[in-house]
Amino acid sequence: MSKKVIFSDGTALPAIGQGSWYMGENASQRKQEVAALQAGLELGLTLIDTAEMYADGGAEKVVGEAIKGRRESAWLVSKVYPWNAGVEAAAEACERSLRRLKTDYLDLYLLHWRGNVPLEETLSALESLQRAGKIVRWGVSNFDSEDLNELLAEKGGAACATNQVLYHLASRGIEYDLLPECQQRKIPVMAYCPLAQAGRLRRDLMAHPLLNGIAQQKGISVPQLLLAWAIRKEGVIAIPKASSAAHVAENAAALEVMLTSEELSAINQAFPAPTEKMPLDIV
């Protein structure tokens, strides 16, 4: 049975969603990007994550095209810049996102990272958007333990629905304190870049002999292994970007991959869990 993550309001979503970072940057890729997102929806990957930052709103336009006529099949997440997190600015930013997405509400709206706007004011802005029916839930992104605890101590802060952070096999810092704290509070963690961002680190993971050996033995790809690893713990949703329908199908199939204790032990030896507090990795 496909693994699911349950939010505090009882909403259950597949533990793998769809990211849109870098979408909308190249017009020649648009048709393929739209088709990839639609393929994901058809495979049950209902969560689509985007942000006003991605391609200066271009990614939201791609997502808007992909969900045309199928809005009810999608669970939309977008993010607001920290400098737009004041009461008036957030209302305006949210309206711009909704126009680009061609919808009248977001399932989840996140503060992209913490800025200079006081958390109290941002909470007021998000609650106002909720009352207006523009957003169903709100959450945060790139919040480390200290920031999250400060948020939760604010009036209304306990309504935080998620914390979206960088998390992959070569970046396990959140396992020391942030992830356990979120699990204890039943705040799902959204893992962005679960396959590591493009570059040397990603290439090293894809070429790693142990990972390739395990993947080959299980009859899966290394990306599928990395996704299965990322969602092995309760309350973690991985949101990889997939640039083609074939990649989306591969991602969706990772929901069914189960790693044995022996495989996890071998992976832990090669990529040890943190033994002390580490600064939050941000891309």
Image (cartoon, rainbow, N blue to C red):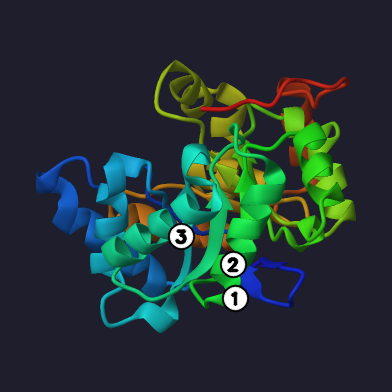
Hey, which residue is sitting farthest front in the picture? 88
Q: Which residue is mark 3?
A: 91
Dot 1 amino acid type: Arg
Q: Is residue 1 visible?
A: no
Mark closer to the chain start, 3 or 2:
3
Q: Is residue 271 left or right of residue 58?
A: right
Instruction: Indicate the position of residue 41 as horizontal and vertical percent values.
Output: 40, 71
Find out whether the residues at labels 3 and 2 contact each other: C-beta distance under 8 Å: yes
Q: Which residue is mark 2?
A: 128
Instruction: Indicate the position of residue 245 as horizontal and vertical percent values.
Output: 29, 59
Dot 2 amino acid type: Ser
Within 10 Å of disc 2 (Cα), the crowding (few <14, some 14-19, many 20+) is some
Find out whether the residues at labels 1 and 3 contact each other: C-beta distance under 8 Å: no
- Camera-side residue: 96 or 174? 96
Against 99, is 26 above or below?
above
**Residue at 62%, 36% in the rendered image:** 114
Dot 3 amino acid type: Ala
**Residue at 77%, 42% in the rendered image:** 148
Q: Which residue is mark 1?
A: 131
| Mark-to-mark CA distance, 3 and 2 | 8 Å
Against 239, is 74 above or below?
below
Find out whether the residues at labels 2 and 1 contact each other: C-beta distance under 8 Å: yes
Q: Is residue 181 visible?
A: yes
**Residue at 39%, 57% in the rendered image:** 92
